Image (cartoon, rainbow, N blue to C red):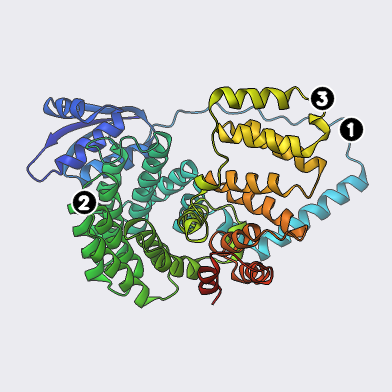
Amino acid sequence: MYKITLTELTVRSDLRAIIGAISNVLNIDKRTAIEKAKNLPLVLAENLPKNEAELMVNMFEGMGAGIKVEPDLNAAPVVPEKEPREIRTELPKRGIPLGCLIFIMLCLGGFAAFVSLRYEWIMEQFKPSPEKAEKLLHKGDIVKARHTIQRQLYAKPNDTDLLLLQGKYYVGAARKKMDKQQWKTYGEAGAMPELDSAVAFFRRAESLNSKNSSIPRWISVAELMRGSVDDAETAARRAISIDPQDPDNWNQLGAVLLAMEQISQAEQVFSNALKINPNNAAALKNLGILNLYYTQDVQRASNFIFALYSPKDAIIKDIDSYQLRRDLASAMINDFNQPLEKLWPQALPFDEYESRRSKLATNPRLKSDYMMLEDLGMLYMSRNELLAAEDCFIKAIRLNSRAESARKMLAIMYMKEESYDKALKIMQAAADNNTRDTFFWKNIGLLQKYYMINSAEANRAWNRYFAIGGDSYNERVRKERQ
């Protein structure tokens, strides 16, 4: 086991990265780390195994710090002498049955033949590699990824791919921590020592290989996460200067410009990524987000989102897809309907509301009369007692599957709270009953197109909408159907 001591800092030392690394290693805040760094020597760790000690030494020496290791890492380990084992020569009292012996020998022979033929394949499965570590990071299994990366860095401490992966590990650890904290410390100086460690590994990788554009791009990612937008922009532009044909580099610069609220420049940069690859998913998504949330050009945003997603993506439970589709549908609802508040039952004075509610709730016919349940549900809905209203409407539908008022009120409630899966399901049930209320067909088309990204189903619903006469939104729907 090894003891690691920080002994010296010089003018060549990367003090910011070293302070971040001390904070991370000792699990202290940066202010305390600075005070400790003023009083050297500083014990960083004790009782470390050799591989972890070598990684820590490489990391701090890469930042320009003086490190002392006890005992010397290059000293030959002392191996205690083992007492000779007593060799037993006694034969077993009972032998192995001949059939079992033949079966065991056949199994061993078959296994030996398999190993001899597939030796390289077998060894490859157990051999750690940067590709396997990358897959673990993508899966979110950062603990296994860290062990895999460190095992390889022990053998190849100057491998830039492994240093890049180690930095990505720290970025992943920081994101996990930020998600746990609900991003409350996002952008605060010193809030994430993991990001300081990530930048240190990325910069060390860049010092060994200045022609790999993914390294400054990842520096930009980490700098943006810790709120250093100027450093993030510089790194992103450096990545583009190395490889201007990589759309990921343009997407990263666009993300930085968005954070700096340079919206028009960000849009141009994302468009540059799309020129390189018209099907680049990140660029399509970024342009969809920019137009939906920043410039609020919903129609333009929908063009990018339709190019990005398909009806299959609406079925897969992907949080990014869900949020974009939900917000796009929400932005379009008022183009096809009156404000949902106007479709809401009118609120009554409390005394009148309570009198009507009491009469309905105590009526013995309530459980068997769907119209009374609809009336009671509307009373609850007018007072925003939505759970009670929903319960009444559902009971009314169970009594009469053609209770359209109940379905319509439920659909309005669900659309207002942006529960579009529920809204679509309840309106589709009305459509299956051949409803002649254009509200259902119009909004089925709306949600099929903008939430489910299914233009074919949307057009079927809108065709039915026109077949039964349409409403005051005819021209808007006709324009949408083209």
State the image coordinates of residue 169 (x, y, percent, origin top left).
39, 47
Q: Is residue 207 visible?
A: no
Question: Which one is in front, 440 or 60?
Answer: 440
- Gap in Å between the C-alphas at discs 2 and 3? 67 Å
- Gap in Å between the C-alphas at discs 1 and 3? 86 Å
Q: Earlier in the sequence, mark 2 or mark 1?
A: 1
User: Mark 2 highlights which residue?
Assistant: 229
Q: Residue at x 47, y 61 (%)?
A: 335
**Pointer 2 local density, CA inside 10 Å: few below 14, some 14–19, many at least 20:** many
User: Mark 1 highlights which residue?
Assistant: 94
Question: For the residue labelled by badge 3, is the local secondary structure a helix, a strand or a loop?
Answer: loop
Does residue 57 appear to the left or right of 137 in the view shown? left
Does residue 327 appear to the left or right of 208 in the view shown? right
Does residue 270 appear to the left or right of 237 in the view shown? right
Disc 3 marks a residue whose amino acid type is Pro
Q: Is residue 241 visible?
A: yes
- Gap in Å between the C-alphas at discs 2 and 1? 78 Å
Question: Which one is in front, 439 or 124?
Answer: 439
Identify whether 350 is placed above or below 15.
Answer: above
Question: Which one is in front, 425 or 467?
Answer: 467
Q: Earlier in the sequence, mark 2 or mark 3?
A: 2
What's the mark number on residue 364? 3
Q: Earlier in the sequence, mark 1 or mark 3?
A: 1
Contact, mark 1 vs mark 3 (Cβ under 8 Å): no
Question: For the residue labelled by badge 2, is the local secondary structure a helix, a strand or a loop?
Answer: helix
State the image coordinates of residue 102 (x, y, percent, origin top left).
87, 51
Contact, mark 2 vs mark 3 (Cβ under 8 Å): no
State the image coordinates of residue 226 (x, y, percent, origin top left).
26, 44
**Pointer 1 local density, CA inside 10 Å: few below 14, some 14–19, many at least 20:** few
